[in-house]
Image (cartoon, grey):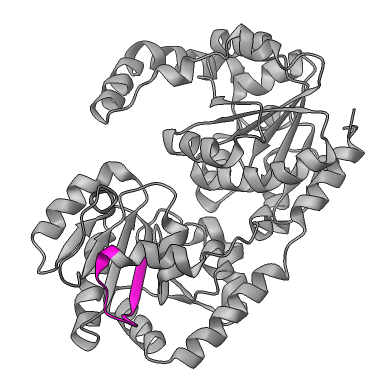
Amino acid sequence: MFFYLYNLLLSIFTVIFLPLWAISLKLKGRSVAPYFHRFSREETEKLRGRPVVWVQASSVGETMLAATFLQEFKREFSGWAVVFTCTTQTGHKTARRLLTGVAELIGFFPYDHPWVVRRFFRRLRPDVLILIETELWPNVLRQAKRDGVKVFIVNGRLGDRSYKRLKKTGFYSSLLGLVDYYCVQSGLDKERFISLGAPTERVTVTGNIKFDQEITEVSQEKKEEFSRPLNLRREAPVLTAGSTHHGEDEIILSAFAEIKKNLPDALLILAPRHLERVESIERLLAKSPYQWMKRTRILQGEVALAPIDLLLLDTYGELKLAYALSTVVFVGGSLVPVGGHNLLEAALLSKVALYGEYMYNFRDSQELLEKAGAGFTVHNALELSREFLRLANDQKLREELGKKARAAVLANNGATKRTIEILKAQGLTGRI
């Protein structure tokens, strides 16, 4: 009954809303075509003779997590061919950057229509499907079961919103039985998956793979290369607001106005989560009193003739560099009910993280940093400015808290190795 209703609604969506979705993507300079793309016969023929693991992640954060997992997977299962797919364009770009040389094929997740999915499986012929976090696509899971493909949820989690929505529908109990094993982040996630219908004996808490992120320090040379065109004054305090969403920029700019009153040399690096918002942010900045530049203009050779107040980071893959340059970091998606974003990247760089009250998708990271005394919730512009000023004016305290943040993350790693052990116990063999 579930699959009948799901596919009926999907068919209606395909006929009525898919054209509108395609137009919407077109207006954003994107295409719907990748979601119907199949790997070519020539590409998949290169995989033959080896077992194939298909790994699916949603967007940038999940792709970065998958990269951490796959580095260890390839060490333990070197005879396997890895095929990686993701759902978003930004995730795909991140995968090209991080997984080239790790995955044999990189592409987009197929549209979850029975016909599209069936053709995708026939062409790819995977032996194992690994879904990162919560990628529960009904037709993909049913086709995997029909084809005898083992399915694993890795780093599984159910945020508050997802859990309430799935609990309310009541349809997912039959779907969860199609997953062979769940490696989940926390005891709460385990309880939630089981309450929705996952068999108890198939769910194990392995921890959060995000704590296993590879530590790559940002060199002083890289930081100077990034900051030089900005014409910053020496020791200028820097606030990076990373992964911001609609409704947060105004709050951050209001906080920055208060910061500038006390620290006139301060720089704000504003990094929107979605680059489609850059134009609207430009209009907002045009009304502000600040001297500002876009990072893309700098990459084209533009240089600030005088110190600027604000850098609009309108590029992919440079947030870590901005964090490394920062005095204090603010992590967005948290002053509005989005659920927050990754706190650990800043922590591993020994940076103190500030964030809003809506961190429900990253509660474990929030609790970890707050327990170490190295993460702070701010509710509005005034609190954001006060916390930044407190930390910017106390270097000793700031550095001490930054070290605590990094140590807290390092003390909680090991989820990747525990997940690998589960895969072995479930029958995956290593080198061939």
Residue 121 shows in the view: no
Magenta stretch encompasses residue 302 = no
Q: Nearer the viewer, residue 255 or 45?
A: 45
Residue 128 occupies which quadrant of the picture? top right
Residue 281 pos. (x, y %): 20, 53
- Up/down of 314 relative to 70, above or below: below
Left or right of residue 25, residue 197 in this image: right
Residue at 76 percent across and 46 percent down: it is 72
Left or right of residue 101, residue 178 in this image: right
Quadrant location of the N terminus in the rendered image: top right
Residue 26 pos. (x, y %): 27, 23
Quadrant location of the C terminus in the rendered image: top right
- Up/down of 68 relative to 379, above or below: above
Residue 25 occupies which quadrant of the picture? top left
Residue at 57 percent across and 82 percent down: it is 373
Question: How many labels sit on residues?
Answer: 0
Residue 280 pos. (x, y %): 18, 48
Magenta stretch encompasses residue 230 = yes
Residue at 52 percent across and 41 percent down: it is 165
Left or right of residue 126, residue 275 in this image: left
Residue 355 pos. (x, y %): 43, 69
- Up/down of 199 relative to 297, above or below: above
Magenta segment range? 229-241
- Up/down of 15 relative to 345, above or below: above
Residue 67 shows in the view: yes
Residue at 82 percent across and 44 percent down: it is 420
Residue 309 occupies which quadrant of the picture? bottom left
